[in-house]
Structures are given as structure tokens and as C-alpha cells.
Image (cartoon, grey):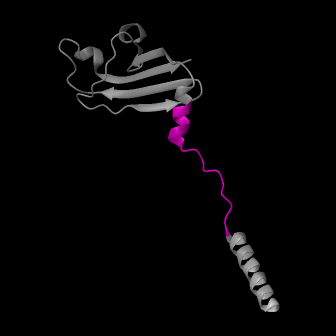
Amino acid sequence: MKFASKIVLALGIVCFLMMYAGCKKHKDEPVPFTDQQLDLLNKAVWKVTAVTLGGVDKMSDSTTNLSRNDTPPVIVQYAVTATNLNMSFSFTGNGYTNRTANVTGDWIFTFGH
């Protein structure tokens, strides 16, 4: 019986080692791109450094009255680095009463810290 129990124990150890050796090592999951971008956005206070409409400087005209309600829907494109945030969109809607010429076109907002 002693011999049989030694064989069973040895087979158990061999099976355990084979199962353990077959396990893949856990590697750190890569941080998703969106999480990297959110981390960049959260690391600083962002201030408007430039505003353009169709390539024309609108910094003094637009930074006090910017509101976004998506009527009509507007797709905003974002680009962020460690020091700059650019938001760009094109507004082609009817605009606002007496303000259509002031809001229609390609806007770029640049933020820095």
C-alpha cells in the first residue's frame, strides 16, 4: 500500500505541475485610448487660448457666450495632447435670429494650460 500511495502522490504532483505550467502569465492590460485621453484632460485646468471661425480669429467675440444644445445636431471632433486640447465642429444650421452670419461655419476652439 505504501508503494501505491507514493505513486498516486507522485502522479498528483506531476499533474499539478503540468496544469500550472500550462497557465498563461497574466500581463497588464493596455490602458484603452479613451482612458488615456480622459487622463490627459483631467490633469490640468484648461483655458481657451484661441477661437477661429473659418480661419478668422474670433477669440474676443465668442468666449463669453458659448452654449451647446445640439439643435441642429453638431458633431464635435476632439484632439488632446498633454498641453493642448482642440475642439472643432462645423455649424450649418439656421443659426439664431439676427445672428446667423456670426455662427455658421467651421469653428476651432483651442485650449491650453
Q: Position of residue 76 (x, y in %)?
A: 38, 31
Q: Nearer the viewer, residue 80 or 45?
A: 45
The residue at 42%/11% (across/down) is: 59
Q: Is residue 55 above or below residue 20?
A: above
The residue at 40%/7% (across/down) is: 60
Q: Is residue 101 above or below residue 10?
A: above
What quarter of the picture does the C terminus occupy?
A: top right
Q: Is residue 105 above or below residue 102?
A: below
Where is residue 99, by image quadrant?
top left
Q: Per the image, is 38 magenta?
A: yes
Q: Position of residue 17 (x, y in %)?
A: 74, 74
Q: Nearer the viewer, residue 73 or 103?
A: 73
Left or right: residue 49 compared with residue 77? right
The residue at 43%/16% (across/down) is: 51
Report the span colored magenta: 23-39
Q: Nearer the viewer, residue 105 or 10?
A: 10
Q: Position of residue 80 (x, y in %)?
A: 52, 30
Q: Nearer the viewer, residue 101 or 81?
A: 81
Left or right: residue 87 compared with residue 81? left
What quarter of the picture does the N terminus occupy?
A: bottom right
Left or right: residue 25 compared with residue 56? right
Left or right: residue 53 compared with residue 98? right
Q: Position of residue 54 (x, y in %)?
A: 38, 21
Residue furthest out toward the front:
1
Q: Per the image, is 84 magenta?
A: no
Residue furthest out toward the left:
97
Q: How many marks?
A: 0
Q: Is residue 79 above or below residue 32?
A: above
